[in-house]
Amino acid sequence: MTLNFNLPHETIYSEAKVSQVIVPGAAGEYGVTADHVPLVAQLKAGVLQIFHEDAGEPEKYFVAGGFSLTHANSVTDISCPEAVKLDDIDSSAVSSNFESAKNAYTSAEDGSAAQAEAQIDMEVNRAMGTAIGLNLN
Amino acid sequence: MATPTTFWRLAGMSYVQYVTRAASAVRNAAKEPAKSKLAANSKFTYNASIWEGGVQGKKVEIDALSKAGI
């Protein structure tokens, strides 16, 4: 299958031949190989795994969200607003940002934009924690 | 019965605002040197211009969409 993986500021892969991608869909994680049924999925904050041909371990990126489009010709386009390699995630920053977000959430007014922003920060940091082996609650 | 939509829509946010916030959360948790390299991605500015008679007027930098009447 062919992978195009783009961020607003950078093209990570353009027409790369890969054997599989595992996509963090908002409705659930799923794998795409050649001849997958066409599919459009919104992504959640989570881990995108790219299995290169003839390579063992997948290349892993943490994506903030975005969309994945799999076409009938075995081309998959993935566009994300931001992505970092798992090795580039700072575990102490994730823990402390999660705690700050949790405090902001409890002190914000119910249903306010500030509370929603704190919830987004909590959920993304929790997902990053899970990706690097932290259990944040 | 609760409205079947996301918490951020209920709080008045659009998808773009939601995903932009999520992207900032990811950048804030990055290690150096990735963090400095990605920091510029959080910055954005707005320009506004008035069209008259099919001609675009001068672009003026504004600091809030409300100042452009949006």
Image (spheres, rainbow, N blue to C red):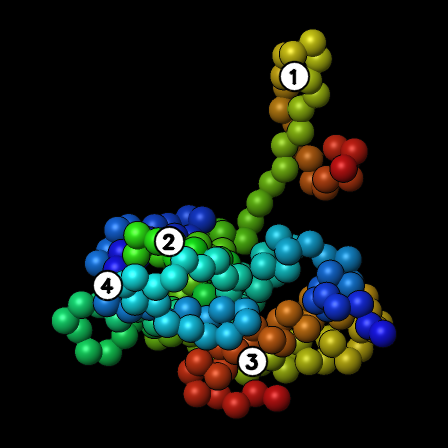
User: Relative to the observer, which residue lies in front, A37 or B29?
Assistant: A37
Q: Please, what is the three-letter code of the amino acid marked with disc 1?
A: Gly
Quarter of the picture containing the N terminus of chain A is bottom left
Within 10 Å of the Cα at label 1, are there few (<14), some (14-19), or many (20+) other Cα atoms?
Answer: few
Q: Are marks 3 and 4 on the same chain?
A: yes
User: Relative to the observer, which residue lies in front, A132 or A91?
Assistant: A132
Q: Are marks 1 and 2 on the same chain?
A: no
Q: Kindly identify which residue carries mark 2.
A: A71
Q: Nearer the viewer, mark 3 or mark 4?
A: 4
Q: Please, what is the three-letter code of the amino acid marked with disc 2?
A: His
Q: Is residue A135 left or right of residue A30?
A: right
Q: Kindly identify which residue carries mark 4.
A: A18
Q: Position of residue B26 (x, y in %)?
A: 51, 67
Q: Which of the marked residues, 3 or 4, is nearer the chain's N terminus?
A: 4
Label 4: state its secondary structure: strand
Q: Residue at x 58, y 59 (%)?
A: B19
Q: Please, what is the three-letter code of the amino acid marked with disc 4?
A: Val
Distance from Cα at disc 3 to Cα at disc 1: 47 Å
User: Relative to the observer, which residue lies in front, B50 or A15?
Assistant: A15
Q: Kindly identify which residue carries mark 1.
A: B57
Q: Nearer the viewer, mark 1 or mark 2?
A: 2
